[in-house]
Amino acid sequence: MKKLLISAILTLGVIVAIQAQQQRFMVFEFIKVESNQTYDFMEFKEFMDKVYQTAINDKRITGWDLWSLQSGADVGEFQYITITYYNDPVSMMNGLEEEDLIKYAMIAHPHLNESQARKIFNDALNSRDLAQRVYMKEIASTKDTFQYKKGTLASFDMMKALEGKFEEYEKAEREVFQSIHQSRIDKGLMGSWSLLRTALPFGSEAKTTHLTMNIYKDYLQFFNAQEYEDMESTKEQQQAVEKGLKSRDQKWVYLATLENAIR
């Protein structure tokens, strides 16, 4: 009996450790680029692809995405969304400082010296503005093997859990909406889905508390999913969906296409 108890405890510890390793932390940056500086920004993006790959190789981050906005915001507000992925909250909050990026730039582009690398970063600051930065923690996701590639479509839904209904909202996402998205994925109508919670403390005046990432391989899959209606849903399931919708306020929906994903 004692051996069985010890075995069960060790098994639980392994499961917890695996779950901790799989948990993702993400920094979303919403970037504004003036129309006459778009070429310079995209040229800098190509330069940074190798820089972020070097940071991944050094295990400072686990990935980096660049998304171009298709709809959901005033074009003057921002046009791009970047996502930097981390394994833990400490690494996320420490982030990549300018000195780290310069070091990785010289490794990724060995023909550059420090002053040349620093000039590239300084020039890049003049071609873009950081409109907003959001720190998020993934708390639920579907089971899928979706591979990000150029042209992938994403709907970033910014939510605010209503006051007093924070736990109710998360429960609805996990128990109601996650299963709906999983069903769509199993039917080939969606690529991936995940629920994120803000990783920093916030007050009642916070604009958003959660974000859902709805991923599709292309526009065809996206529009097929919009037209899809699960005729097998029961009355109880429909009521659960309606109750879940009343626990949050959908603040914004941003539709974006993937320019590049570094892993």
Image (tube, rainbow, N blue to C red):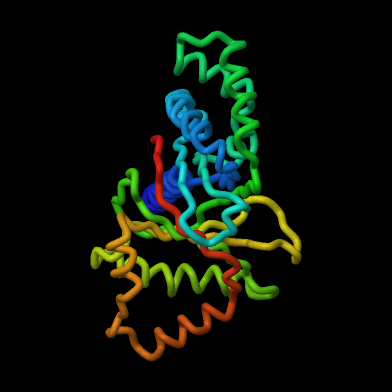
> Residue 197 in the image: x percent, y percent?
58, 57
In the picture, measured across the screen, residue 216 lies left or right of residue 156, that is: left
Q: Quadrant of residue 201?
A: bottom right
Percent across and percent down for residue 11 are 39, 48
- Whether residue 230 is visible to the viewer of this picture, yes or no, is yes
User: Residue 16 or 69: which is nearer the viewer?
Assistant: 69
Identified at 57% across, 13% down, the residue is 116
The residue depicted at 55 percent of the width and 8 percent of the height is 113
Seen as rendered, the residue at the extreme left is 187
Q: Is residue 234 left or right of residue 64?
A: left
Q: Name the quarter where the N terminus is drawn.
A: bottom left
The quarter of the picture where residue 100 lies is top right
Please tell me whether residue 86 is drawn above or below residue 160 in the rendered image: above
Q: Position of residue 232 (x, y in %)?
A: 28, 84
Can residue 2 be seen by looking at this rendering? no
Residue 53, located in which quarter of the rendered image? top left
Report the quarter where the C terminus lies.
top left
Total residue callouts = 0
- Left or right of 16 on screen, residue 221: left
Residue drawn 64% across the image and 31% down it: 125
Left or right: where 198 falls relative to 141: right
Residue lying at the far bottom of the rendered structure: 235
Along the viewing direction, whichever of 218 and 15 lies nearer the viewer: 218
User: Considering only vertical position in the picture, is 257 above or below 39?
Assistant: below
Return the x and y of residue 191 as percentages of the image width and height.
32, 57
Q: Which residue appears at 62% of the width and 51% of the height?
A: 199
